[in-house]
Image: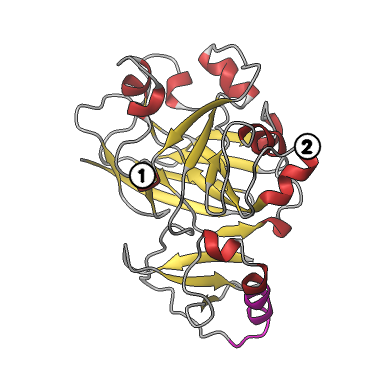
């Protein structure tokens, strides 16, 4: 299933995109798309039942904002330097264990919402990423095989980053990762049954129409299953938590000087195979 949330910011309603690409209203079936729904097998079964019945009201998509596909996100766990090609382009040694940092849930915006270039920023960068959405509590998961059973679905995530704040201002990466609007998510939450192998997904990103990133999750240093297993050894993952799993080569940081960091007026478009497409215009904060 392709689950999404539509409407004005803060007042989104649950919806789904059916097999024919028709947008349908789910608000009469479930209150929202969130961790509580993803952990409720009976509720999900009901959604699946009505999804194929044609009973759900049709929504007019014209002019309708698409919000983040997940409400009330608990935490966003991010994996840094998780692609072989991205490590090479930045001159970094591939990590021996996953690099973990966090984004605040309030960085999340809709897939087509405006993204704000922070005040004083000169190095705002793009990163297309596969987001993993947790649907079952994961605590000390024992194997990679068991790890995927805790995944509810997948989404497109844009891990916008300010490289000076991240790398040149001291401390950890958090200052460059948690600026307002720095995590567009969606358009859909695609349930795990529609993604049989998360290591076979193409990721692409364009800046002002120029292709910048053209990668595949096959290049991940730590596969999705290993990321979920590994993270669960250090913290409990709950339904509604999100893991951003890293970005492939092609970011501004990896280009020759002068690096083409983002400015107000730039337009970024990104997509992941089967998971949908985003488009954001950048403006000054």
Q: Which residue is mark 2?
A: 143
**Neighbour tally class for label 2: few under 14, some 14-19, many 20 plus, Cα within 10 Å:** few
Does 53 lie within the magenta span?
A: yes
Q: Residue at x 65, y 34 (%)?
A: 227
Calculate the distance from the C-alpha at mark 1 to the C-alpha at mark 2. 31 Å
Give the camera-side residue of 73 and 14: 73
**Mark closer to the chain start, 1 or 2:** 1
244 vs 139, left or right, is left
Specify the principal SS of the magenta part: helix
**Neighbour tally class for label 1: few under 14, some 14-19, many 20 plus, Cα within 10 Å:** some
Question: Which element is circle 2 on?
Answer: loop
Q: Residue at x 54, y 63 (%)?
A: 36
* Circles 1, 2 touching at the beta carbon (< 8 Å): no
14 vs 64, left or right, is right
Placement of 30 over or under 132, stated as above or below: below
Tell me where residue 281 appears, x and y as whole percent.
Answer: 32, 47
Q: Residue at x 36, y 40 (%)?
A: 182
Tell me where residue 261 appears, x and y as whole percent.
Answer: 35, 27
Give the camera-side residue of 227 and 223: 227
43 vs 182, left or right, is right
Does 208 lie within the magenta span?
A: no
Q: Quadrant of the C terminus?
A: top left
Q: Which residue is mark 1?
A: 107
Q: Which mark is residue 251?
A: none
Tell me where residue 249 appears, x and y as whole percent.
Answer: 56, 26
Range of residues picked out in magenta: 45-55
Question: Which element is circle 1 on?
Answer: helix
């Amino acid at each position: 299933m392709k689950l999404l949330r539509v409407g004005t910011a803060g007042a989104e309603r649950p919806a789904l995109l059916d097999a024919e690409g028709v947008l349908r209203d789910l608000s009469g079936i479930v209150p929202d798309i969130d961790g509580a729904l993803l952990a409720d097998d009976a509720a999900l079964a009901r959604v699946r039942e009505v999804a194929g019945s044609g009973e759900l009201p049709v929504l007019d998509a014209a002019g309708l904002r698409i919000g983040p596909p997940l409400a009330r996100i608990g935490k966003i766990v991010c994996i840094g330097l998780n692609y072989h090609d991205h490590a090479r382009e930045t001159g970094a040694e591939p990590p021996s264990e996953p690099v973990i940092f966090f984004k605040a849930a309030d960085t999340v915006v809709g897939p087509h919402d405006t993204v704000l270039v922070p005040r004083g920023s000169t190095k705002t960068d793009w990163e297309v990423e596969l987001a993993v959405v947790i649907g079952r509590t994961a605590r000390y998961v024992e194997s990679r095989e068991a790890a995927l059973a805790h995944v509810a679905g997948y989404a497109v995530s844009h891990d916008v980053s300010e490289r000076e704040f991240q790398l040149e201002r001291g401390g950890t990466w958090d200052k460059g990762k948690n600026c307002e609007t720095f995590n567009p998510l969606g358009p859909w939450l695609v349930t795990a049954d529609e993604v049989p192998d998360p290591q076979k997904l193409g990721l692409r990103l364009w800046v002002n129409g120029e292709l910048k990133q053209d990668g595949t999750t096959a290049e991940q240093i730590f596969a999705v299953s290993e990321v979920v297993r590994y993270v669960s050894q250090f913290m409990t993952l709950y339904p509604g938590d999100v893991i951003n799993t890293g970005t492939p080569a092609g970011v501004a940081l990896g280009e020759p000087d002068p690096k083409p960091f983002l400015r107000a007026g730039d337009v970024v478009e990104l997509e992941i195979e089967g998971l949908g497409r985003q488009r954001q215009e950048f403006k000054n904060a």
